[in-house]
Image (cartoon, rainbow, N blue to C red):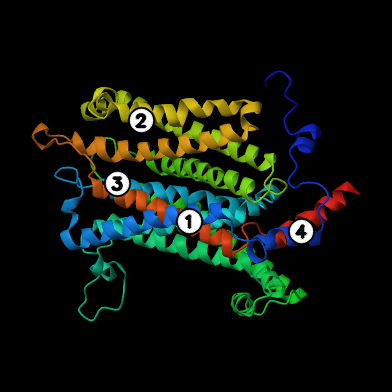
Amino acid sequence: MSAGQPPFDSPEIRRLTPVIGPGYTYGSVTDKISAIVLTRPTSLGWYIGFLIAFSLMGMMTVAIGWLIIKGTGIWGINIPIGWGFAIVNFVWWIGIGHAGTLISAILFLLNQKWRTSINRFAEAMTLFAVACAGMFPLIHTGRPWMAFYMMPYPSTMGIWPQFRSPLIWDVFAVSTYGTVSLMFWFVGLIPDLATLRDRAVKKPMKIIYGMLSMGWRGSARHWHRYQSAYLLLAGLATPLVLSVHSVISFDFSIAIVPGWHTTIFPPYFVAGAIYSGFAMVLTIAIPLRKAYGLEDFITMRHLDNMAKVMLATGLIVAYGYFMEFFMASYSGNKFDVFLVQQRLHGPYAPFYYALLLCNILIPQLLWSFKMRHNVAVLFFMSIVVNIGMWLERFVIVVISLTRDYVPSAWGRYSPTFWDWATFIGTMGMFVTLIFLFVRVLPAISIAEMRELVAETSEEEK
């Protein structure tokens, strides 16, 4: 503990970093959050940001269209590097989606009240990240119009998916994860949609929000069923946080490739997913609270807690890096030892040193209380971690494939313009969806914030 820092979780810390700002009532919470959607005029900054993001999404559409016309030869993949940007970006986007489910489901089951202000847009982030991730295996197959063969549809010809293929595992894992996350997100939205329905002035908005709120009237029976359904979905979503990225890690660990064939991958991938996911939540939360004046709702306590989770998962990831080195040396397997040497001294060594800098060294600043309470530093740190986790996926995929067992099969990989256009375009798609979400739906849960106001008032008494 640094000098001058109050004891951990002391009353002074809780006073300095409350879950919600002082002086809020049911009405003021509802007014402030619903006004962003219903009455607040759309700013010029929103239009500029949306236009830039939408333009990048348009570039992605062009890149995928050209891919369908010409084939995967426009990418940098080759023999032996048959996996390139598509799989790197798929794993990266799925990882980003993990924090939303963790914040929503696991912290809800653990009764962590600080999740209340950030769970709604974290859940939306999960859905948008899964949408971005899901495209890459589809277009990586080369014939996306044949994608229905990956689903176990009733086939009169008896043609079934190859269930020993990791591609099929990914389809089931990601589709299950996306479906449960969507249901969880929508069920949580129902009371807020009813609030927007009752407060909307324009007739079309009343109709749309009225249809989406599914006849919610706030009766005791409605609340009882809502809480039961929400708890059940939280229980379903919790194992998915651990299982989905474990299944995706099997894409690598079942292959007899140096650096891939290891049992540490499932927990290693899950920790990395939560690490990058919380970094992306910070990347969204910090500009959001600034743009809409939500500092009283997304307080320093939220940012501090997310920084602590990032620090903890970052240390687990660092342990995974250490264990890779240790197991390669301890096993005496010359191919694993050679892979370690390639990471340190091979043609892609700068990428490996960059990921160590981004994922291990720079995040150690989060041990400092002052750094965790500096918003600019946290925003910079979240960007750095996201870059580092992307580099980690790049290193795992590319270095292992470029230096396989037989030197005659060695190769090099360089992404092309179309690789970059597709990847940057998915970032544009993600940001576009975030902009639309903030504009048409409450980014913070109104119902849960009102419940938090009531509990805070009781504690003050």
Q: What is the distance, in whole Å, between disc 4 and disc 3 at their CAs?
A: 45 Å
Nearer the observer, disc 1 or disc 2? 1
Nearer the observer, disc 1 or disc 3? 1
Between 308 and 161, the residue placed more toward the observer is: 308
Q: Residue at x 63, y 63 (%)?
A: 37
Circle 2 crowding by C-alpha within 10 Å: few under 14, some 14–19, many from 20: some
**Residue underneath mark 3:** 420
The label number, if any, that marks residue 50 in the structure image: 1
Marks 4 and 2: in contact by CB < 8 Å? no
Q: Is residue 28 above or below residue 394?
A: below
Q: Earlier in the sequence, mark 2 or mark 4?
A: 2
Marks 3 and 4: in contact by CB < 8 Å? no
Q: Earlier in the sequence, mark 4 or mark 3?
A: 3
Element carrying mark 2 = helix
In the rendering, at what x and y percent does residue 220 appear? 77, 74
Q: Is residue 157 above or below residue 120?
A: below
Q: Earlier in the sequence, mark 1 or mark 3?
A: 1
Q: What is the distance, in whole Å, between disc 4 and disc 1 at their CAs?
A: 33 Å
Q: Residue at x 55, y 54 (%)?
A: 44
Nearer the observer, disc 4 or disc 1? 1
Q: What is the distance, in whole Å, between disc 2 and disc 4 at their CAs?
A: 46 Å
Marks 1 and 4: in contact by CB < 8 Å? no
Q: What is the distance, in whole Å, between disc 1 and disc 3 at their CAs?
A: 20 Å
In the rendering, at what x and y percent does residue 178 appear? 46, 62
Q: Earlier in the sequence, mark 3 or mark 2?
A: 2
**Residue underneath mark 4:** 451
Between 100 and 387, the residue placed more toward the observer is: 387
